[in-house]
Amino acid sequence: MRALPLAILLVLCTAASSAGDVSGKVLFHGTPPKPFLLMMNADPKCMAQHKGPVYAEDVLVNPNGTLRNVLVAVKTGLPSRKFDLPGKSAVLDQKGCQYHPHVLGVMAGQEVEIINEDPTLHNVHSVSKANPQFNIAQPRAGMKMSKRFEQAETFKVKCEVHPWMGAYIGVFTHPFFAVTGDDGSYTIRNLPPGDYTIEAWHERYGARTLSVKVTGPGPATADFTYEAK
Amino acid sequence: MDTWTPSQRRLHRFAVFTACCTFLLVIAGGLVTSTGSGLSVPDWPLSYGKLMPPMVGGILYEHGHRMVATFVGMLMIVLAYWLWKAEERRWVRILGLAGLAAVIVQGVLGGLTVLFLLPTPISVMHATLAQSFFGLTVIIALVTSPGWKRVVPREMPVADKTRRLALSVSGILLVQLILGAWMRHSDAGLAIPDFPLSYGQMLPPATDAGISAVNQDRLAGGLPPVELSQVWINFAHRLGALLTAIVVLSFVLHVLKAYQDEKRLREPAIVLGLLLVMQILFGALTVWTGKGVEIATVHVAVGSLLLATSACITLRTFRLFTLSQTEPEVSTLAQLSRS
């Protein structure tokens, strides 16, 4: 009987060692739209935190022609099992009357800490459909609250005090997601071997999907392309 | 002829003042929705736990609306009490109580819509009651005026038809305001982003595939995706506008033709026609400006003026003329309005 746990451990170790990464870039073709200048004069405390003009983050094209703030995640192909939650909380920060990060990926059930670092008041309103909506006041700097989202969906979080403030939270039942940064690249790590559909989602340009095969520890690549319209 | 006492004059002026403040309240409420500030204050009845929060960003609109609403509520309490004590006509006293009940219900609906995160049915009720309450305050101002009391009803052969048409105008305007509120509070104001066509066609998409196609373009154009129901409530409001225009214009033409010597009907009918033209123009501008805050709010305000004007005209058709043929459903209202 002692051999059984050892065998299971061996199988798991083998599976882990054969897991691979999927990485790629999200390319943007065409002329990006003109950045939208945010008018923060409705709240002088917001304006005072910025020395120069602040632009909307809905479309951010990096100097290397890639797109930032794209949420890339495995859509299909995963075994139907429960994945472990990450050890630490995800953080959504309100600073300079903007959300940081602008797009956040979390696992269903993972703790999300929402912080107000601004010297002004915010309301935090989730425009979720599968998860219960909330609208909570954070009137003072340093206030924190924790939330957990149990259902998979991507939804907007906004502040009606400062109507330019918006962020997106993608909730997944697995840990295989990433958000593109200032080089437009992403990496989804430790995927078990298999055939997957990977979906990229951008708040303005919508979803794109690609098929990718993970055969082992070697990297698989999936580059997405969005066209300017 | 009744003499108009100083007390009655003061009561009428107070009723006019209440109606004017209520109109400002409708504008303040319209601004809350137009600026998307409805949830900028998450708590109710206090605002961020205070009577007076910092008036920044969306709080300026939401808390400002609450302040105007509180003031109008107090005015309505005084008006209802005053009517109860000083008004001889029982039905006018009841109008005062109805106004008081409406303003209380309206306050509760406003609180509920905040606490339950703007559920569409409650928000629609709040918006519709706002415009109806404004109409009620205008009616109170009208029936407490000297002109109303001095009327000597005369016989008019076409009065029955006029009354029916006037009731139709008030009815269709109310339905159209409900449709407008429903569209506005289900975030469907730009569900069809062009006007007078709908996505370049006479009819908007009617299938899920059609909606998927337009959503791709909407996303690329910076507009949020829409659902089929949002598109069709928007289209229903447009169809409603067409029907309303036909009914209102028919009524205005009827009054201009049949009441050449009755300026108490002709003048408000002309005002009603002008308001209609203005309303259609601002409806179109609301779409063309991508729901510009001021434009959309004027559209709401003119909608409430249309309803109030039609309500006044309807009442006047009962007050000014005797029935040429008594009918059960209108006789009670006619009897009431004669006093």
Image (spheres, rainbow, N blue to C red):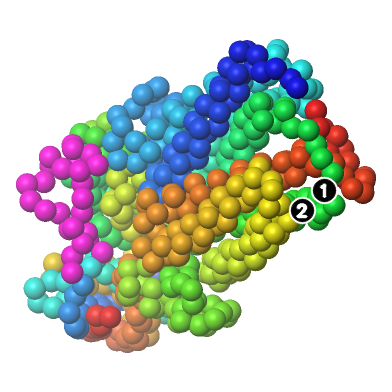
Q: Secondary structure at mark 2?
A: helix
The residue lying at 92 percent from left, 45 percent from top is B326
Mark 2 residue crowding within 10 angstroms, few (<14) / some (14–19) / many (20+): many
Residue type, label 1: Met
Q: Estimate the x, y position of residue A99 in percent, counting from the top left.
A: 25, 51
Callout 2: chain? B
The residue lying at 32 percent from left, 75 percent from top is B220
The residue lying at 53 percent from left, 55 percent from top is B274
Q: Estimate the x, y position of residue A114 in percent, counting from the top left.
A: 31, 44
Q: Is residue A40 magenta?
A: yes
Q: Is residue B275 magenta?
A: no
Q: Is residue A128 above or below residue B208?
A: above
Instruction: Please tell me which of labels 1 and 2 falls first in the chain.
Output: 1
Q: Which residue is mark 2?
A: B162
Q: Nearer the viewer, residue B64 or A96?
A: B64
Q: CA distance from mark 1 to mark 2?
A: 10 Å
Residue type, label 2: Thr
Q: Estimate the x, y position of residue A203 in percent, counting from the top left.
A: 32, 67
Q: Select label 1 or label 2 by which is in front.
A: 1
**Label 1–label 2 contact, CB within 8 A:** yes
Q: Is residue B233 visible?
A: no
Q: Which residue is mark 1?
A: B156
Magenta residues span A34-58
